[in-house]
Image (cartoon, rainbow, N blue to C red):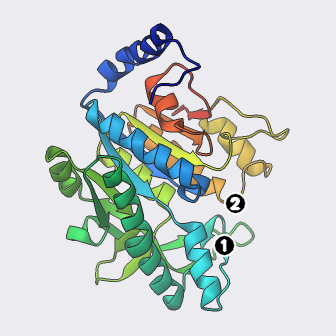
Amino acid sequence: MTNPAIAPAQEAGILAEALPYIKRFHGKTIVVKFGGNAMIDEQLKQCFARDVVLLKLVGMNVVVVHGGGPQIENLLTRVGKKGEFIQGMRVTDAETMEVVEMVLGGQVNKDVVNLINQAGGKAVGLTGKDAGFIHAKKLLLPNKDKPEDLIDIGMVGDITAIDASLISHLQGGAFIPVIAPIGVGENGETYNINADVVAGKVAETLKAEKLVLLTNTPGVLDKDGKVVTDVTPKQIDAMVEDGTMHGGMLPKISSALEAAQGGVRSVHIIDGRVEHALLLEILTNHGFGTMIKSQ
């Protein structure tokens, strides 16, 4: 629908502005982590789905990895359990794992697939169990107070390998893969894996042009709450050390940095609460949020 506030010539100019970006990213892989408010607010969900379909139709290979924290919390509360986090990772016992798999692999994954399909795309939902494409082992976290003792947080996985052939096969058929962050162990165990970590590893394995992490903050914030437009590994270490970066931002920044160092051309943490955030980041020169530098 035409916006009456924008003159036709101006509208054409806005579209033409996207041309160099479409040329640059045509045929390239863009991995997007879909999470935070963007997954709950109806208007933001519709914007996200339309953005993904538009990027696919102009020739980009979009891969979506989604989280589902609020939805998991909701169901855990209903069954009388309370979520617990250590270093930004969800502590996952056997009962919690059942809930996580049900919510991520069932409800949320199919909701995202349906959203994209309704917007005109051809999305296919996957978990790491499909074709066993996300291999994982138990994740043990470092203990700051006792470096010799590792922290066991239950059925939380550390990715050991990703078989990208399934994703490549889907991309070849013009499908949009939508991945739930669940991995499979050597003996068939199910592992809950942080969605930011999965997005980073998928981007690295696919040699993606871009990794975009949608989040509930304007980007990486300094001590005064101001957005840092780009950060280096040294700055990240300092911000973790002094507590500026904490909680859910820790796995996010760590996977973003690994992806940047692993060959992903550009890695961005952007505000998913902004309508059409994805298009603004990829098809305009109004980049916002934080870019993660590899060195």
Residue 16 is situated, as x and y percent measured from the top left of the image, at 39, 13
Residue 204 makes an appearance in the image:
yes
Residue 258 makes an appearance in the image:
no
Q: Is residue 23 left or right of residue 157?
A: left
Q: Secondary structure at mark 1?
A: strand
Q: Nearer the viewer, residue 181 or 294?
A: 181
Q: Residue at x 25, y 51 (%)?
A: 122
**Label 1 Cα neighbours within 10 Å, binned few <14 / some 14-19 / many ≥20:** few
Q: Which residue is mark 2?
A: 247
Asked where in the image residue 59 lies, by quadrant, the reply is top left
Residue 271 is situated, as x and y percent measured from the top left of the image, at 62, 41
Identify the mark at residue 122; answer none if there is no mark.
none
- Who comes first in sequence, dot 2 or dot 1? 1
Q: Residue at x 36, y 71 (%)?
A: 183
Q: Nearer the viewer, residue 203 or 2?
A: 2
Q: Secondary structure at mark 2?
A: loop
Q: Amino acid at mark 1?
A: Phe
The CA distance from mark 2 to mark 1 is 8 Å
Q: Amino acid at mark 2?
A: Gly
Q: Is residue 240 left or right of residue 96?
A: right
Q: Nearer the viewer, residue 209 or 18?
A: 18
The residue sitting at the front extreme is 4
Asked where in the image residue 266 lies, by quadrant, the reply is top left
**Label 2 Cα neighbours within 10 Å, binned few <14 / some 14-19 / many ≥20:** few
Q: Which residue is mark 1?
A: 85
Q: Nearer the viewer, residue 109 or 269?
A: 109
Residue 24 is situated, as x and y percent measured from the top left of the image, at 33, 20
Split into 4 quadrants, where in the image is the N terminus?
A: top left
Asked if 265 appears above or below 7 in the picture, the reply is: below
Q: Residue at x 30, y 63 (%)?
A: 125
Q: Residue at x 39, y 66 (%)?
A: 109
Report if the CB atoms under discs 2 and 1 are less than 8 Å apart. yes
